[in-house]
Image (cartoon, grey):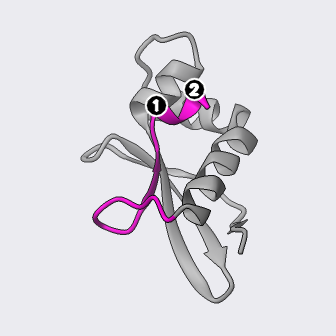
Amino acid sequence: MSLSFKPGRAVYDPNRGVLRFLAIDGALLVKCGVSRNALVALDDGSPRGPALLERVYERHQQRIQEIANRKHRAKQLESDGMILVGPQDLKN
């Protein structure tokens, strides 16, 4: 089943270096995230603060969510169950 992404703002987790966002698979809440490195790669490669990273996410939200959906279908999860979009995922 495809993910349905919850509207709303993504939240940056500085401890993990991940911008977190949520999706739903039926009745299941799915934790998703995109790494800071992936967001920097999507922009011009320059380091960015949390507010600017959120704007990069907003500009590339559809692509990031498509990758997260693909990883969900393939059951490519992190050890904590999160679907994480990293720089390597942007090459596909």
Return the residue nearer the eye: 73 or 63: 73
Which quadrant, please, contains the N terminus? bottom right
Q: Is residue 24 magenta?
A: no
Is the C-beta separation of discs 1 and 2 under 8 Å?
yes
Q: Residue at x 56, y 10 (%)?
A: 44
Q: Is residue 82 magenta?
A: yes
Segment colored magenta: 75-92
Q: Position of residue 47 (x, y in %)?
A: 40, 16
Between the residue at mark 1 and the residue at mark 2, the CA separation in whole angstroms equals: 6 Å
Q: Residue at x 55, y 79 (%)?
A: 29
Q: How many marks?
A: 2
What amino acid type should be assigned to the residue bearing mark 1? Gln
Against 62, is 87 above or below?
above
Residue 79, numbered circle: none
Q: Position of residue 34 (x, y in %)?
A: 49, 44
Residue indicated by mark 2: 91
Against 38, is 32 above or below?
below
Residue 41 seen in this snapshot = yes
Residue indicated by mark 1: 88
Q: Position of residue 49 (x, y in %)?
A: 42, 27
